[in-house]
Image (cartoon, rainbow, N blue to C red):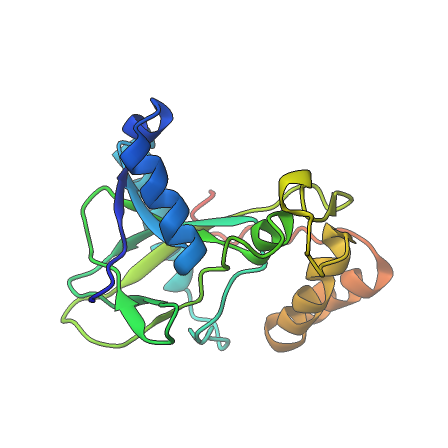
Amino acid sequence: MTLAIPLIDLEAAEGGDRAQLDAIRAATEDFGAVQVVNHGVPEELAADLSARMARLLSLPRAEKARLLEHADDSAVTVLAQEGDYEGLQVQGPGGGWIPVPVIPGALQVFSGHLLARWTGGRLRPGRHRVVAGGTVTRRSTAVFVYPALDTVVGPLPPFAAGSADPPVPVWDHVKDRVAGYLAEYGRPEQIAAWHDGQPYVPELAENSAGR
């Protein structure tokens, strides 16, 4: 059987459409990803965020992020993808890769490791990757959803039986990943602030999207 990422009508799901809810449950248990439409996010908002990201990524920086297969540390990750080919892929339960169709206006929603921990592993973190192809620039704009850093995340009561995951503060869950990211991509002053436990807020460049 050929697996496919389900397209969920979020408005219908919120209205109690059983078929939509069952499709969400099955997909998040099997491979941790769905696409959603009728989500209420204005197209102009998503387009503006994408344009700002494009300006940021066009700046002359020596560091370039590499897109490798991974599952996110977040509770949920929401993507908006643009391009002319199915470069985004999700790993299926058998280890194969499932292409995510580019559907105008649709958002891609991935389960993260924190959501998996909350559900005692019942919901699978959505492992995904990007492959090369197409004739125009492909871009995904992501929003990572986390609870507060002092939140303790463990299996919720309906999922606690048989779970081997102990409760963990969100900060303990993400700090090693943050340290690894800074070691590879961080500015010296950013790394120094991290070591001192201080916030780091850089000044905006003259050509920044925020000016």
> Which residue occupies the foreground of this view, 93 or 181?
93
Residue plotted at (69% across, 39% down): 157
Residue plotted at (63% across, 47% down): 118
Residue plotted at (72% across, 68% down): 176
Give the farthest residue toward the top: 15
Question: Could you tell me residue 208's position as x and y percent?
Answer: 46, 51
Q: Quadrant of the N terminus?
A: bottom left
Q: In this view, does 206 lie above or below 12?
A: below
Question: Could you tell me residue 174's position as x and y percent?
Answer: 69, 60
> Which residue occupies the foreground of this view, 165 or 97?
165
Q: Is residue 140 above or below residue 95?
A: above
Q: How many labels does the image show?
A: 0
Q: Is residue 49 above or below residue 88?
A: above
Residue plotted at (36% across, 36% down): 21
Q: Do we see residue 95 in this rendering?
A: yes
Q: Is residue 66 left or right of residue 73?
A: left
Q: Is residue 211 left or right of residue 171?
A: left
Give the farthest residue toward the front: 162
Question: Could you tell me residue 50's position as x and y percent?
Answer: 33, 49
